[in-house]
Image (cartoon, rainbow, N blue to C red):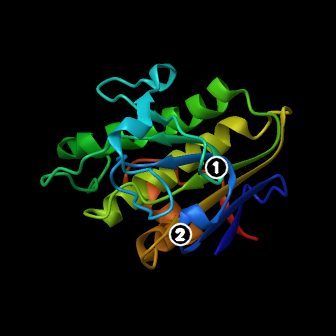
Amino acid sequence: MRIRPFNSTRFLVDIAQGDILDESGDVLLIGRSRGLRSPKYHIDEPESWKQADALRLPGRQPLQYVRHDLPWKIAYSYPYHTRSHTHLPKGPDDLTALHYYHLRNDLGIYLLKVLLHNQFRGDVTIGLVPLSWRKPTLTAHAMVEGLAGMFSCIRHWSELRSLSVVIRSLDEPQEMLQVFEDDYFRDWRRRIGWSPNERKIWFPA
């Protein structure tokens, strides 16, 4: 599935089943550092990571990969752990879903921090994998909303000639494909309190 955020030729989201380490680009963003394993790389070894203090978020300490053996120039780990009671909001006043809202907002800020901290220019490619295998529906919603926030913020950044986001999942990414479907996405946002007149974001490429 290939998507043009805001129908802009500068932006592309490419989502498919596959191994993100078979792709290459500027920066790779994964969940827990031990959540991605490979016989060719040391990505699941604790000593391969250091604290990325510039990307710190309240209650979360992202990590940066210190080796230079990946097909991605930079790699970061976002230490997210699922909670058994976490669920999607049932409506705009569902205060029991605060964990979801925190995750969604943190991801949007995290993505922007990665771009700003590395001062990317020109053509940029970001790699992503699902944040969690245990609650794929919840994390798919949070990730797609975080990406929507990121693309909304950078639409007019002249420093970026193009930005591509490559998302790969070892399993069929059914949950994320559903959330990227624009009719579903806009209906979902209306149900949790966004304006019914919100601009369309996801267009088929």
Q: Is residue 1 left or right of residue 78?
A: right
Instruction: In this rendered view, identify the residue nearer to me: 61 or 183.
Output: 61
Measuring from the top left, give residue 55's x and y in whole percent. Answer: 49, 26
Instruction: In this rendered view, identify the residue nearer to me: 124 or 58.
Output: 124
Measuring from the top left, give residue 8's x and y in whole percent. Answer: 81, 55
Q: Residue at x 72, y 27 (%)?
A: 119
Measuring from the top left, give residue 184's x and y in whole percent. Answer: 49, 69
Q: Is residue 80 left or right of residue 203?
A: left
Q: Which quadrant of the structure image shows residue 75?
A: top right
For the C terminus, give its image quadrant: bottom right
Residue 100 visible at all: yes
**Residue at the disc numbered 1:** 72
* Label tally: 2
Q: Amino acid at mark 1?
A: Trp
**Residue at the disc numbered 2:** 19
Dot placed on the residue nearer the N-terminal end, 1 or 2: 2
Q: Residue furthest left?
A: 85
